[in-house]
């Protein structure tokens, strides 16, 4: 379930944009479910190694951690460090975007996934709308790092927009919740879509990859069988260009 949820989530995240926001919400559901269960597998393995193969109690898994992705991730970092496994956690932790994403996913898993229902029932909203918040906190960093507007493309957009402005009508909403009412705004926002898609997926992928590598290290350490790591092979790639180019992350045999 964890493997499939992560595969579906990353695949859907690679498809979302301001015209098709449904892919974003669906991806966040799948990713939070997948990461939570993956990290609970890590907690189980670590407990078994330290307790002669005994499993933790249901209370430990359900009540101590629940949907707290932040706490589970901190535990995973600690487990990796205590065992001196050669995983990429130092580089991962040093990147500000990692902690921002973990905090976002943890909050989404606990409260924001009910944002629309809470809004309809009048419950006070502590955080911004989920896509709006992702755009302001995560996409802002992604665009600053990876988006380079091409002068030729901008000129083309301006030229085409000037010709179509008087004969077209646009009525869309940006990821910030603002109205898009001109063809120029539509094209300019559209020019950023691929970068947002690719790198939103990429930064979550490398978090999942760290956890998959940790799971594998624990499994080998404890000599556990069956080999659960085989279900996560598609999340263990370290080829950056391949990860960024891939659009589908479903495991073989899905």
Image (cartoon, helix red, strand yellow):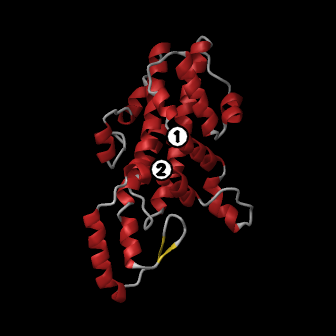
Q: Residue furthest bottom?
A: 166
Which is more toward the observer, 2 or 101? 101
Residue 203 appears anywhere in the view: yes
- SS state under label 1: helix
Question: Residue tagged by mark 2?
Answer: 141
SS under mark 2: helix
Q: In the image, what residue occupies the spot 60% across and 50% down?
A: 108
Left or right: where 206 falls relative to 45 = left
Which residue is label 1 attached to? 96
Using the image, determine if residue 98 lies above or below residue 210: below
Q: Residue furthest front?
A: 151
Residue at screen point 41% across, 48% down: 145
User: Residue 165: x and y, percent?
Assistant: 35, 84
Is residue 34 visible to the viewer in this orientation of the structure?
A: no
Left or right side of 141 for 61: right
Residue 72: horizontal and vertical position, in percent? 60, 33
Q: Could you say where residue 114 lies in the image, as x and y percent from the top left? A: 64, 57
Q: Residue at x 31, y 68 (%)?
A: 154
User: 136 or 52: which is nearer to us?
Assistant: 136
Percent from the top left, x then y, of residue 254?
A: 37, 43
Label 2 crowd (10 A; few <14 / some 14-19 / many >=20): some
Which numbered marker is on residue 159? none
Up-down relation of residue 189 to residue 53 (above or below) = below
Among numbered discs 1 and 2, the one appearing first in the sequence: 1
Q: Report the front residue among 27 and 227.
A: 27
The CA distance from mark 1 to mark 2 is 9 Å
38 left or right, relative to 227: right
Question: What's the residue at 49%, 19% (across, down)?
Answer: 218
User: CB atoms at circles 1 and 2 under 8 Å apart?
Assistant: yes
Write down the quadrant of residue 203 in the picture.
top left
* Residue furthest to the top: 52
Compared with 102, 82 (above or below) is above
């Amino acid at each position: 379930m964890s493997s499939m949820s992560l595969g579906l989530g990353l695949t859907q995240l690679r498809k979302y944009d301001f015209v098709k926001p449904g892919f974003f919400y669906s991806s966040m559901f799948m990713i939070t479910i997948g990461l939570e269960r993956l990290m609970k597998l890590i907690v189980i393995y670590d407990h078994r190694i330290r307790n002669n193969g005994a499993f933790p109690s249901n209370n430990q898994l359900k009540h101590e951690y629940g949907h707290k992705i932040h706490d589970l991730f901190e535990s995973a970092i600690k487990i990796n460090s205590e065992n001196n496994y050669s995983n990429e956690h130092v580089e991962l932790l040093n990147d500000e975007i990692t902690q921002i994403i973990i905090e976002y996913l943890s909050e989404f898993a606990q409260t924001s996934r009910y944002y629309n229902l809470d809004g309809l029932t009048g419950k006070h909203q502590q955080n911004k709308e989920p896509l709006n918040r992702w755009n302001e906190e995560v996409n802002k960093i992604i665009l600053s790092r990876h988006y380079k507007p091409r002068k030729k493309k901008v000129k083309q957009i301006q030229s085409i927009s000037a010709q179509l402005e008087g004969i077209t009508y646009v009525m869309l909403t940006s990821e910030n919740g603002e109205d898009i009412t001109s063809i120029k705004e539509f094209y300019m926002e559209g020019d950023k879509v691929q970068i947002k898609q690719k790198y939103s997926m990429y930064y979550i992928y490398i978090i999942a990859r760290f956890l998959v590598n940790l799971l594998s290290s624990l499994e080998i350490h404890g000599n556990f069988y069956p080999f659960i790591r085989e279900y996560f092979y598609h999340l263990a790639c370290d080829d950056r260009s391949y990860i960024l180019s891939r659009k589908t992350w479903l495991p073989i045999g899905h």
